[in-house]
Amino acid sequence: MNQRPQQPQHRGEPQRAPQRSSAGPQQGGPRPGNFQVNIDQRDLMTGPIEQPRGRRQPDLYSEPPSMKKAQLTDKELRAEKRAHKKRNRVKARKNKRIFKIMWLCMVLLISFTFASYLIGGSNDFLGAGRPEGKADVTIPEGELTEDQLAEILHQAGIISKPEFFSLYCKIKKNIDSFSPGTRLQVDTNMDYEAIITALKGGNESREIVTVAFPEGSTVLQMANLLEENEVCTAQEFLTEVNSGDYSEYKEIAALGSDTGNKYYKLEGYLFPDTYDFYKGEDLEDVIGKFLWNFHQKLSGRLQEKVDASGMTLDQVVTLASIIQAEAAGTTDMFNVSAVLHNRLNFGGDYGIYNLECDSTSFYPYKNQQEMDQMGGTLSHGAYDTYQVSGLPAGAICNPGLDALNAALKPNDSGDAARYLYFCHSAEGEAFYATNADDHEYNKQLAGLE
């Protein structure tokens, strides 16, 4: 077989692939390694394809095939953005509303819990809610703190709120007078002061009496009730009310040493309630029960209202005492409060410069009849609101919680915001007026003229 002579190959020169015929493969020859594409010359001359106007078509090579929708026009994009912002605003308002509701629920829960805690402490202080019975308690040897004593009494079932009892002992500062190592039997329904007296060993031969003081009681009436129940004499009580030092209570300390024209220094601060006393009990302990109870009632939300009222505590107590003495009932208190506040705030615009409340005319007595019965005389014009402008020198009685709340939040809705006059019938029906003419007519309706 003839062989072609091989071409000499130079070093460094790549070996050339054998040339193939362009006419295609021969019969039975190997499959070609390339192919030919026929393109019409006119196709190569065609310009760019025009895009349809309006909507832009997606680029199949640059944009992912997973796109949910084609790109929008500028107008549609702006509309989409506005709709998105609107959805976000609606969602934000909904979330804000939910947050407010949750916050309100949290505040109410905390307030309810705190109020329940204070009420429980006040009841424990008075011995209310504890079952009747006796419990044995031993005062241990050695130094004893208030917290330790409170826990001992709590374990014995004598008190239910050891933290309140501990605070009371710290205020009284008389724990050092207890006799260590003494074993005593104590009534489980006694108030804190009676418990302390029992722990001093001074209750063996003294009888306990329960005395109820109605809301609006005056210092003079309280003194007479205490004397009737043989707790102390009325004169001893009245003297202690003015001369005793009770500055350990912040409410009394705020009065200062100069009480001005006050007839009884502690009038208004001896909270009316039901108390247990020993016959012949120490006067400081007797008055301490009233002041401690007032301190407890004022704690928390009520104190916050006083701070926000723009009035001093003494002004609030004085105003509340007049409301207590004048009103025919709890609902009436808020309307009477409206009249008094309106007279104080803008009465001068109508030529009204005095509160003109009958209840202040006979202080320290309740009325003319009480003054005559006790053989008293009027000698303290600083309390008569027909003579003095603004508030009197001090409280005219000891108000309850409703009157204190009414003094801090008068009725300011509807006509009540303009009330300047009020009067009551003999049956206690209340009449209110915004001007003098209507007031004169109301007095006729009430049977006062």
Image (cartoon, rainbow, N blue to C red):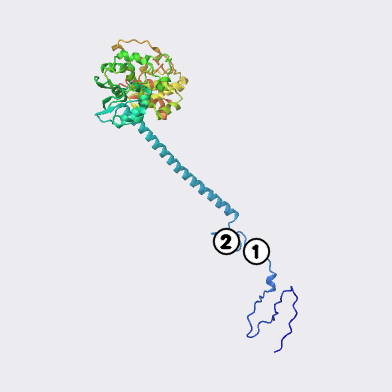
| Horizontal and vertical percent position of residue 79 | 56, 52
Please give the name of the residue rendered at 30% of the width and 11% of the height, measured from the top-left corner.
372
* Residue 406 occupies quadrant: top left
| Horizontal and vertical percent position of residue 241 | 35, 16
Residue 25 vs residue 210: left or right? right
Residue 53 vs residue 260: left or right? right
Instruction: Say whether marks 2 and 1 touch (CB < 8 Å).
Output: no
Element class at badge 1 = loop
Q: Which residue is mark 2?
A: 64
The image's mark for residue 178 is: none
Q: Residue flagged by tag 2: what amino acid is it? A: Pro
Please give the name of the residue rendered at 31% of the width and 31% of the height, measured from the top-left corner.
154
Please give the name of the residue rendered at 40% of the width and 29% of the height, measured from the top-left corner.
300
Judge whether residue 376 can be spotted in this image. yes
Judge whether residue 435 can be spotted in this image. no
Mark 2, mark 1: which one is toward the viewer?
Answer: 2
| Horizontal and vertical percent position of residue 19 | 70, 79
The crowd level at tag 1 (other Cα within 10 Å; few <14, some 14-19, many 20+) is few
In the displayed structure, 305 sits above or below 65; it is above
Query: How much space separates mark 2 and mark 1, taking CA atoms?
Result: 22 Å
Q: Which residue is mark 1?
A: 50
